[in-house]
Image (cartoon, rainbow, N blue to C red):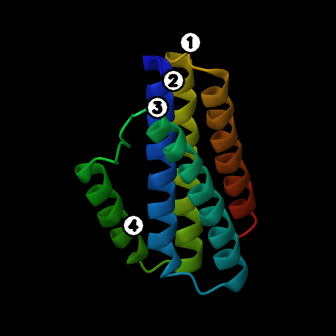
Amino acid sequence: MDNSTKKLLEECSVGCKMGIESMEQVQHHVTDAKIAATIEKSCSKHKELEEEISKILLRAGQPEKEPGVIVSTFSWMTTGVKMMTGEDENKQAVKIIMNGCNMGTQSITEAMHQCKDASSESISIAKKLIGMEENLRDDMQKYL
């Protein structure tokens, strides 16, 4: 596996994991059944894509890359603080998810531009992840 493909797949894997982590964090605060169902559906899709990426990396003998401890800790702390602002928890959860989608789309798009020589399979996976993020963001907008 060439370096560009490896790097792009690693970024997609980390992006999926961060998305899953964020969705699982806010689910504990969501009381609206429609919002919860939308988040759960997207979380399942992210888990499926992450498993696909993991299998590709493992077949190539590449270990999975985990999100950094500092990034994960900061994410947990930020979510906790935002959920305690006194604003409606459902609305706050929607905003957190939407911000995460925007950050995910930006980082995967940036990785695609940096990894122009990546395999068509990895580029397809990156585009799929971007589409998932954009769809979730659009779905969440309905709840603001």
Q: Is residue 76 left or right of residue 86?
A: left
Q: CA distance from mark 3 to mark 1?
A: 17 Å
Q: Secondary structure at mark 2?
A: helix
Alpha carbons under labels 4 and 2: distance apart: 32 Å
Front of the two marks 3 and 4: 3
Location of mark 2 (residue)? 5
For the residue carrying disc 1, how many other residues have a C-alpha within 10 Å: few (<14), some (14-19), or many (20+)?
some
The residues tagged by marks 1 and 4 sit, at their Cα atoms, a distance apart of 36 Å
Residue linked to disc 3: 60
Residue on which the image places disc 1: 117
Q: Label 4 sits on what residue type?
A: Thr
Q: SS of the residue at dot 4?
A: helix
The residue lying at 54 percent from left, 51 percent from top is 50
Nearer the observer, 2 or 133: 2
Which callout, 4 or 2, points to the residue nearer the camera? 2
Q: Label 4 belongs to which residue?
A: 79
Q: Which mark is residue 57?
A: none
Residue kind at label 1, given as amino acid type = Asp
